Amino acid sequence: MKRIQLLVALVALLVGCLNNTTEHRVRANAFFRGGNYAEALKECDIGLAGKPDDVGTLILRAKALFELDRLEESKADYTRSVALGEGKGKTYMGDAYLGLAILASRDKDWKEARAEFERLLSTDPDDVGTRTNLARVCLELGDLPKAEEHAQFAVALRGQDEAALFVLGRV
């Protein structure tokens, strides 16, 4: 019985330590993971009302907007989150770079997609998915040597990755 009371007290203490913005981001993340993007967006908006420059909440808002097919707003939030958070080391910026890269790819803006995938790659040089996507973008740009380099690197990391093997086969 005492253990349960102690556990309840600890959980209450932890929840009480969260600031309002973090609390709303946690809720938004739960809604997002559950596929309820509209509710995730609402929670992000509430959290950002109290702290408009919260990079983590802004990135999550951009992701929710993307899923709701509100692409221009999503791009604006990703761009703002990068402007606010890049180089500060407090928030992982990879999700923002990935979001911008996907949006650029959808628009067939291959130069921008390449730049964003390269930024993403700088956060994890061994990421097979990023290497494969970068190889695809380089193919679109006609940069066969770089496409081959990224595809070979991806295959070297994960030899049976079908996407990487497919891209390498196209080079």
Image (spheres, rainbow, N blue to C red):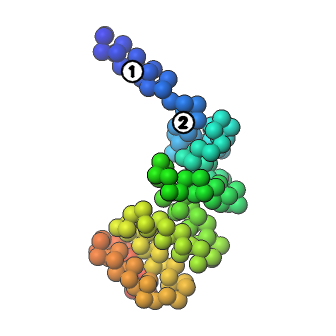
Question: Mark 2 packing: few (<14 Cα in 10 Å), some, or many (20+)?
Answer: some
The amino acid type, in three-letter code, at marker 1 is Leu
Pointer 1 residue: 10
Query: Residue 9 location in percent, x, y?
Result: 40, 16
Quadrant of the image containing the C terminus: bottom left
Residue at horizontal 54 percent and vertical 84 percent from the top:
140
Residue 21: quadrant of the picture: top right
Rendered image: mark on residue 123: none
Query: Residue 73 location in percent, x, y?
Result: 70, 56
Marks 1,2: beta carbons within 8 A: no
Judge whether 24 appears above or below 12 on screen.
below
Pointer 2 residue: 22
| Left or right of residue 168, residue 26 in this image | right
The amino acid type, in three-letter code, at marker 2 is Thr
Of residue 145 and residue 86, the one placed in the foreground of this image is 86
Cα distance, mark 1 to mark 2?
Answer: 18 Å
- Mark 1 / mark 2, whichever is N-terminal: 1
Judge whether 170 appears above or below 99 on screen.
below
Residue at horizontal 39 percent and vertical 21 percent from the top:
10
Quadrant of the image containing the N terminus: top left
Residue at horizontal 39 percent and vertical 63 percent from the top:
124
